[in-house]
Image: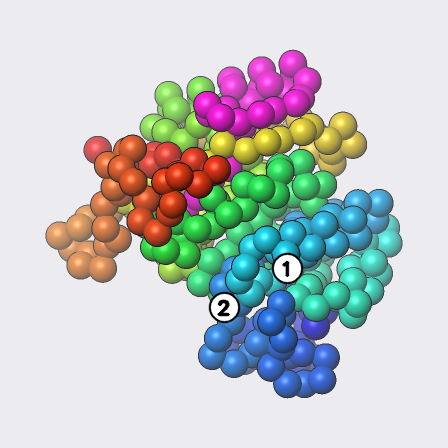
Amino acid sequence: MSSRDHGDASGVRAADGAPSRPAPDGSAAGPSGASPGPTPPALEVVLPVFDEERRLESGVRGLRSYLDGAFGRRALVTIVDNGSTDATPVIGRRLVDEIDGVDMVRIEEKGRGRALRTAWSASRSPVVAYMDIDLSTGLDAFGPLVTPLLDGSRDLMVGTRLARGSTVVRSLRREALSRGYNRLVHLTLGLTVSDAQCGFKAARREAVEHLLPLVADDGWFFDTELLVAARRRGFRIGEVPVTWVENTDSRVHLWRTTVRDLEGIARLARHPVPRWDVAATPTAPEPAPTPGAPVPGRDPSGSAPPPTAVGVPE
């Protein structure tokens, strides 16, 4: 696969902005890789990383193993290195060379939102997703997360640690901060998803292409702002309960992130995203299905529950 430095002029990015991801032999990629031809992988999973030399290899290999064995469709794993100063880029380039279906993008600035914006904007896959490199979220939730997007019954899907059916192991402090934050965005921004900041989300590419220009934040508040814009624009949002185990070696600075999130909430409260004017915009998406309605294409007898419909505009 290919390793790319974002903005490099060495031919790694096509003139129209689309990435070029040839197979090692220059032909179309194999079953688990991406192709520059007309049939990209069904899913691209982005792994934003910063100074993750200790966890990068195990996280990439674990995710790639799951996708190759249980997912059942072609998928690409893209490492986005946010200007790491340790051995992360070296390890990432080696993994790209060793493992089919792995790509890498290097950007010089930090920010989870910036990493997602960079990779999702360049993706050719019909569904894009992201998760944290520590794999705190159980991978068995991947199927329920992306299936409603692949079958077209949802536009965005959110993993949740706060809904019925989720299993969470974390400190009381993080639990309190999470519940307090989500309660605040419910009250101030009208967001109805139960867990706006869970690092496990996916979306249809068409929805992402519409929403990214509406999102100003390039850091941790990116997730919340994306969901607020999606709700106000009438996109169909679902959520899936996850198993989540806290990583005690997290790179997240909780209090600094909390302050920036509060600043983001205040900004959106002052300058909300306009609701979709359906009369003036004939290409507006379909309204969200009624909460609790069956999801097309899913086996109701399966072990994973169907996603809960949330974010239905008034």
Question: Tag on residue 238?
Answer: none
- The answer to whether the residue labelled 2 contacts the one labelled 1, judged by CB atoms less than 8 Å apart, is no
Residue identifier under label 1: 68
Give the percent coordinates (x, y) of residue 62: 72, 50
User: Looking at numbered disc 2 in the image, what kind of residue is underneath it?
Assistant: Arg
Residue identifier under label 2: 124
Judge whether residue 115 can be spotted in this image. Answer: yes
The residues colored magenta run 154-180
Direction from residue 31 to residue 8 in the image, left or right: right
Judge whether residue 225 can be spotted in this image. Answer: no
User: Looking at numbered disc 1 in the image, what kind of residue is underneath it?
Assistant: Asp
Q: Nearer the viewer, residue 108 or 104?
A: 104
Q: Is residue 155 magenta?
A: yes
Q: Quarter-wise, where is residue 188 in the image? A: top left
Determine the residue located farthest toward the front in the rendered image: 301
Q: Residue at x 51, y 47 (%)?
A: 143
Give the percent coordinates (x, y) of residue 22: 64, 79
Q: Residue at x 65, y 52 (%)?
A: 66
Placement of 268 over or under 3, stated as above or below: above
Q: Nearer the viewer, residue 46 or 297?
A: 297
Placement of 292 over or under 119, stated as above or below: above
How far apart marks 2 and 1 lie (CA) works out to 19 Å
Q: Residue at x 36, y 40 (%)?
A: 300
Determine the residue located farthest toward the left in the rendered image: 279
Q: Nearer the viewer, residue 191 or 58?
A: 58
Q: What SS does tag 1 mark? A: helix
Q: Is residue 174 magenta?
A: yes
Q: What SS does tag 2 mark? A: loop
Give the percent coordinates (x, y) of residue 35: 57, 76
Task: Rate crowding at label 2 as few (under 14), some (14 to 19) or many (20 or more) other CA atoms within 10 Å.
Answer: many
Give the percent coordinates (x, y) of residue 207: 38, 55
Closer to the eye: label 2 or 1: 1
